[in-house]
Image (cartoon, rainbow, N blue to C red):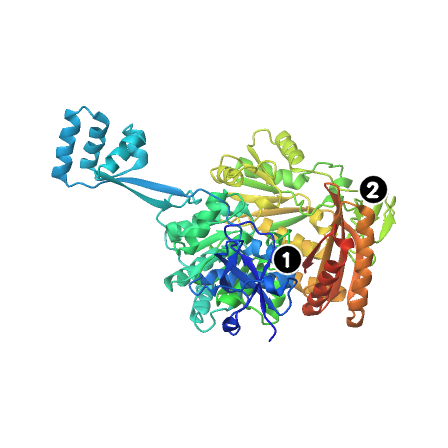
Amino acid sequence: MQEWYADVIVDITSEKLDRVFQYQIPEAMLERLEPGMVVEVPFGKGNRLIRGYVTGISRQTGYDPEKIKPIGRIVTDAADEEARLVGLAAWIRNRYGSTMIQALKTVLPVKQKVKSRQLRTVCLELDAQEAAERLELFRKKHQTARARLLEALLEEPELPMPLVTEKLNMTSGVVKALEEQGIVSIKSEKIYRNPVAVRQQESRPVQLNEEQQEIVDEITGEWEEKPDGRYLIHGITGSGKTEVYMELIACAVSKGQQAIVLIPEIALTYQTVLRFYRRFGERVSVMNSRLSAGERYDQCERARRGELDVMIGPRSALFTPFSRLGIIVIDEEHEPAYQSETMPRYHARDVALQRGRMEGAKVVLGSATPSLEAYYGAMTGQYRLFRLCRRAKEAALPRVQIVDLRQELRAGNRSILSVRLQELIDGRLKAGQQVMLFLNRRGYAGFISCRSCGHVMKCPHCDVSLSLHNNGRLICHYCGYEQPQVKLCPRCGSGFIRTFKAGTQQIEQEVKSKFPGARVLRMDLDTTKGKEGHAKILAAFANHEADILIGTQMIVKGHDFPDVTLVGVLAADLSLHVPDYRAAERTFQLLTQAAGRAGRDRAAGEVVIQTYDPEHYSIQAAAAQDYEAFYEQEMEYRRLAGYPPAGNLLAVHCACADWELLTLACDYLKKFIEQIAARHQVTVLGPADEAVAKIQDVYRKVIYLKHERLELLTAVKNKMEEYVGMNEGFRTVNIQFEVN
């Protein structure tokens, strides 16, 4: 009979990972053993039994069968959440292309050796009469330190060790001597670092409006019937989506379940955590990259031990080891921050849906500007769609004006601020109200446009903007099309062809020169360094320590400042013409989110959008706050071009320090793809330089594959991985896959 073998990752939480080990499966286990199970295996020369995770089962082995050790036993008391997370890692590895070890490191982070914090307490072991007799004896012998400690313990039989050593000036030797005599004992318990540094306050119960209550009632009404239900809440900015989330989480907690709340960026954590902490108290925690290793480890331990009900954080919080997960909430689900940029390049929305399916947990997506993928999913029945159409505090939506920068230029205004925006800022400052100025720099990649008519130079094959390179050529980062830099506009003949160059520091200087009495804060990567960088700036602005807040996209996401009545969008075009098929969608989302920061309380809000392309449908729809109109027009473009969600797109990212080797490897890879994909009519674009073609002396290229069926692209990806693994020439070329 041919033997069966199991691929096992060993002791993932306490040792460095470098490879998969193979073990022989005893006949008695064949029927029961499955990938994802926890086992004990003999390891090393001494054959000590250690824990491992089964990642695959096969009849093939690359080793001498005589030397392969058998699995010791299936660990039936292993934490279920660990086995489920291993299963999730296997799904991630198959969908996004990576090694199993990379997927496991993402899902089950390697435990760093972090010294746990211990709370040590000195306890009196004698009754009062015996202790009084010993105290008298110490006094007679002039053993003042021992006497002082015993006096304190007679008043309070248990004292924390820091109080004994610091306040009573006692050495550990004195305590140890009394311990050896049986007079005291030392009790030690592990305490966990809590990164939520917020004083708990009495939370006022929120009265939900009719729309909010209806959503809560509908979802909780089918809680048991559809444990892994999927929902999309499309709510305008300020409509109270967070209150709905909290009610749903309260329902989960009341049933003994746990909740994960994903937020797109660290900048949001401060205000979000504050609201959840006031509602759920100490059983809320956060997980993000700015926590120390000790804090991260402690939060995982607290989650494993069932001491937490709610975990809040960016995409890494999705892998919190909860054993009774009941709901996953993804706030602002449209945000690009949910896409991982390192291997495996997973999208948190898709992984959350898979985890919800595997663990019977609900997944709730929420956004004022849903991603086209989510809304398309709602339109095709994958999600149940709910709408919130009015603001929670009955505040009116802000009035939006579009300023044509071409007209400003013709009138002689070369300032970053239009005349109309300057007038409105002056009025708000006089009224004691606050202003936010948003520089739309996301994805800035040096596109070229005509300042007279607004025309942008685009690729004739891919309908994305061409990027200007140092060699003076315009290049498409999808298919590699090139053309010389233009001197005259092909639409109107004007010679006024320019790139846009402005940064937050320049804007800060100009604002200060035009409004010398205003207090100005700037929020960008330079000013938010450090653990509390975002929180300090947001808290200062919330406390009215500044009149004007200038920043990039991080200032327009989810923040709620009641006294902000004016928002200025300084350059709507910067995200509109990046070389990305999602440019119009990103622009619409950013502009709508920016507009949503104004007038969230009783005072009316106003928004000024400055642009060289005022007729563009994404800008018009954002000004009207009309998502449906934008969706219809954008989906038409996606269908015609075969872009997601109408089709599927697989990006093959290749990087190498040797440009000639990278070029050769990409050419071979493209020929291989065309051979295996030709009969399925897969469209292959590239190879082309990445938008940033060289980082730290490493050259980068990309190949795109388009097809309507994702499973076909996954099969092609698997073939590519086999091909790359078998060819030595690819050894120095780093290859990563990205889906949609």
Which numbered mark, 2 or 1, is in the foreground of this view? Answer: 1
Tell me if residue 565 comes above or below residue 389 in the rendering. Answer: above
* Horizontal relation, residue 614 to residue 116: left or right: right
Q: Residues within 10 Å of mark 1 (few under 14, many from 20)?
A: some
The residue nearer to you, when weighing 59 against 519, is 59
In the visual, does 715 lie left or right of 187?
right
The x, y position of residue 277, in whole percent, is 41, 50
- The answer to which image quadrant residue 6 occupies is bottom right
Amino acid type, mark 2:
Phe
The answer to whether residue 648 is seen in the rendering is: no
Q: Quadrant of the N terminus?
A: bottom right
Residue at 43% across / 54% down in the picture? 303
Residue 241 appears at what percent x and percent y? 49, 57
Which residue was labeled with disc 2?
Answer: 496
Which quadrant does the C terminus fall into?
bottom right
Q: Amino acid at mark 1?
A: Thr
329 or 588: nearer the eye? 329
Look at 59% across and 65% down and name the residue there. 56
Question: Callout 2 environment at 10 Å: few (<14), some (14 to 19), or many (20+)?
Answer: few
- Say whether residue 335 is visible: yes
What residue is at 56 percent from the left and 32 percent from the top? 518
- Asked which secondary structure carries label 1, the reply is loop
At x 21%, y 38%, the residue is 183
Q: Indicate the secondary structure of the residue bearing disc 2.
A: loop
Residue 99: mark in rendering: 1
